[in-house]
Amino acid sequence: MIAIVCHGDLDGLVSAALLLDIFRDSPTTMRTTQPYLLHNSLATLGYVDQLYILDIAVDVGSWNRVVFYLSRLIEKGCKVFWIDHHISTLDKIKWLLDMKVSIAITIEYCTSTIIREVFCNNTSNPDFFMKLSYIGEIGDKIIKNNRDLLELADTIELSLMTSIGDEEFKQRLVRLWIHEYKFVNDEVIERAKLGRVELERVLKLINNNVIFSSELADLVDLRGIKARGYIGKAASIRADITGKMVFIIHEVSPREVIFTARAPSESNMDVLTILRSSLSGIGGVGGGHSKAASYRLSKALAEFAVSRLQNVLRKPFTRELV
């Protein structure tokens, strides 16, 4: 049995689709997860010969549990492959190599890029999967100048926003790609229409809930507001429109808040470094990369965290943060 555990966004799902096509003659299973929940997915795996972890950043808060379940799988003879593009994963590369995990990582590109370069020519339909991999790259802002694929990527991404916890829809979408060689169908298009309306609502909420603003950054408070699934995309749009970094605090559970951050796609601004310097010292955990990052911490520390982040954002720094 071959198991694939991937991030549930465009990059993760596209990467999984290419691998599932490569292994179409072998027994496979696929599931999506978030970085901080990876250990839960690993815990539910039975015996598998190979495990592919795709587009999942190492989450420091759950790292010890991930190590435990990975070690258990490896002891049973499972070969583990971790393919990713996040700095937090790179930070743990020695640990992973010591555990005999095979790693392919890029910081400049994304997981879809690696999968395409290694596997695409051996897929059942290289032309289709080549374009699909470009859609995965568009989702992570690696490609920005292919108008036809940009529209397709936008439609698929919006459909996923309406289905943030809908594992069955994600499975159907991947099957559409690998069995029918279609990028979208009527279900995807209808979900995208709903997603576009909701995204516009969230963009307006962001505009109305800015609690701190400077030349280089906006801090937005969406606690108590329903916006799950749309915050990352909305933050990216606002960052590109304003040319500023965007930090959004929002709730994910009664006990935790998340700071989601995005930088303008054409800048060298580094939101991950800012979140680390603001929140790591008070129990915040998370990851990502310079353009897109998130950190979680206890709800009880939310106001203190907001104050620390504001203090960091008030410090003088250049527009091209490196």
Image (cartoon, rainbow, N blue to C red):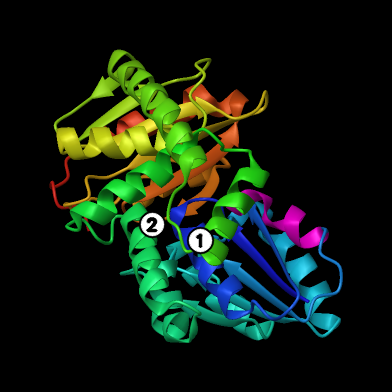
Residue occupied by mark 2: 289
Q: SS of the residue at dot 2?
A: loop
Q: Is residue 221 above or below residue 244?
A: above
The label shown at residue 177 is: 1
Look at 78% across and 75% down and name the residue there. 71
Residue 79's place in the image compared with 237, above or below, is below
> Mainly helix, strand or loop, the magenta region?
helix
Along the line of sight, which residue is nearer the eye, 66 or 315?
A: 66
Q: Which percent across, then down, holds residue 88? A: 49, 62
Secondary structure of the residue carrying tag 1 is: helix
**Residue in view at x 47 percent, y 30 percent:** 305
For the residue pair 239 and 256, the one nearer the viewer reads as: 239
Q: Which residues are magenta?
A: 35-43
Residue 121 coordinates in the image, percent (x, y): 42, 85
**Rendering coords of residue 320 (x, y %):** 15, 52
Q: Quadrant of the C terminus?
A: bottom left
**Number of marks drawn:** 2
- Identify the image quadrant of residue 95: bottom right
The reply to whether residue 241 is visible in this rendering is yes
